[in-house]
Image (cartoon, grey):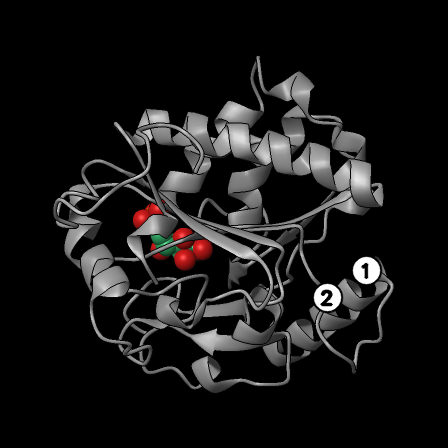
Amino acid sequence: MSDLDVSIAADADALSVSAAEQFVELARAAVLARGRFTVALSGGSTPRRLYERLAAPPFQDRVDWTRVEVFWGDERGVPPDHPDSNFHMASEALLDRVRIPRQRIHRMRAETPDRAAAARDYQVEMARAFGVDETGRPPSFDLVLLGMGGDGHTASLFPGAEALREGRRWAVSVEAPQRPPPSRITLTVPVLNRAREIRVLVAGADKADTLRAVLHGPHEPERRPIQLVSPEDGRMVFLVDAAAASALGPAPRAVAGGAK
Ligand code: 6PG
């Protein structure tokens, strides 16, 4: 990964504006090219700001929500109305506030006791929505939104987890012992890396050292799983705020607040 893939915004607020601009543009281009926009959402506090932006003027009316097909990169093992649910967060911040048809919202049923089965079902649901064979190659999302934890995890791909080595399944059940709630479902690297566009949203000084290690350190994905994310044919951009970028050094950077 190189720092050319990094766009730095002044603060978390500017970061959410920049991310919203890119969401709007990518949605417009996808709808024009393929008639719809398929996006995988992330959990976390940084994406939440983006969702709130998208749900309010001027962004709300700049997306044809009727053509947006929503999935999740990961989900926590709690009911959909639980405050820790990524579905709940996205619903509250965005989905309940725009005209998106309910049948286009594909949540992960991570509250199901048999999470492995729920992960398999999600693969089937993705295949159906994308019109592809569930036993074939994973589909290409128009956009995958990701966050990054201070430990270098992304989606629910945690350091040392077996899920990091998954080469076939598109979604798996995982345990994340150090993070409540521990039981989750996550998309896997093979499907993430088929995305046309990936945006990783990172804000806050507490992420600065990890971001430096991820971008400039050795390739150690067992320790920093986000290093596994590298789209085959797509584009991946880290959208970060100045605090998260503070350890990156004086290397050339993209324009503050703007898209790369
Ligand atoms: C989750 C996430 C996770 C998140 C990062 C960053 O459900 O926990 O999808 O991967 O994006 O932990 O979260 P913050 O933006 O809150 O730091």
Location of residue 152 in the rendering, given as x and y in whole percent from the top left corner: 29, 64
User: 135 left or right of 196?
Assistant: right
**In terms of depth relative to the viewer, which is nearer, 13 or 198?**
198
Can see residue 151? Answer: no
- The quadrant in which the N terminus is found is bottom left
The three-letter amino acid code for the residue at tag 1 is Phe
In the rendered image, the vertical position of residue 162 relative to residue 24, given as above or below: below
Q: Nearer the viewer, residue 127 or 216?
A: 216
Q: Amino acid at mark 2?
A: Pro
Q: Is residue 12 left or right of residue 96?
A: left
Quadrant in which the C terminus is drawn: top left
Measured in 3D between alpha carbons, the distance from the residue under mark 2 to the one under mark 1, in whole angstroms, is 7 Å
| Residue 42 horizontal/vertical position (percent) | 50, 50
Tag 2 near tag 1, CB within 8 Å: yes
Tell me: residue 128, above or below residue 196.
below
Disc 1 within 8 angstroms of ligand 1 (CB): no
Q: Earlier in the sequence, mark 2 or mark 1?
A: 1
SS for tag 1? helix
Task: Identify the residue under disc 1.
Answer: 130
Residue 146 image position (x, y, % from top left):
46, 53
Q: Is residue 260 visible?
A: yes
From this view, report whether residue 113 is shown above or below residue 233.
below
Q: Which residue: 48% across, 54% down?
A: 236
> Does the beta carbon of the residue at mark 2 sit less than 8 Å from ligand 1?
no
**Crowd class of label 1 (few under 14; some 14 to 19; many from 20; radius 10 Å):** some
Q: Label 2: how many residues lie within 10 Å, few (<14), some (14-19) or many (20+)?
A: many
Which residue is labeled 2 in the image?
Answer: 139
Quadrant in the rendering for residue 17: top left
> Residue at 18% of width from left, 38% of height from top?
243
Badge 2 marks a residue whose secondary structure is loop
* 96 to the left or right of 3: right
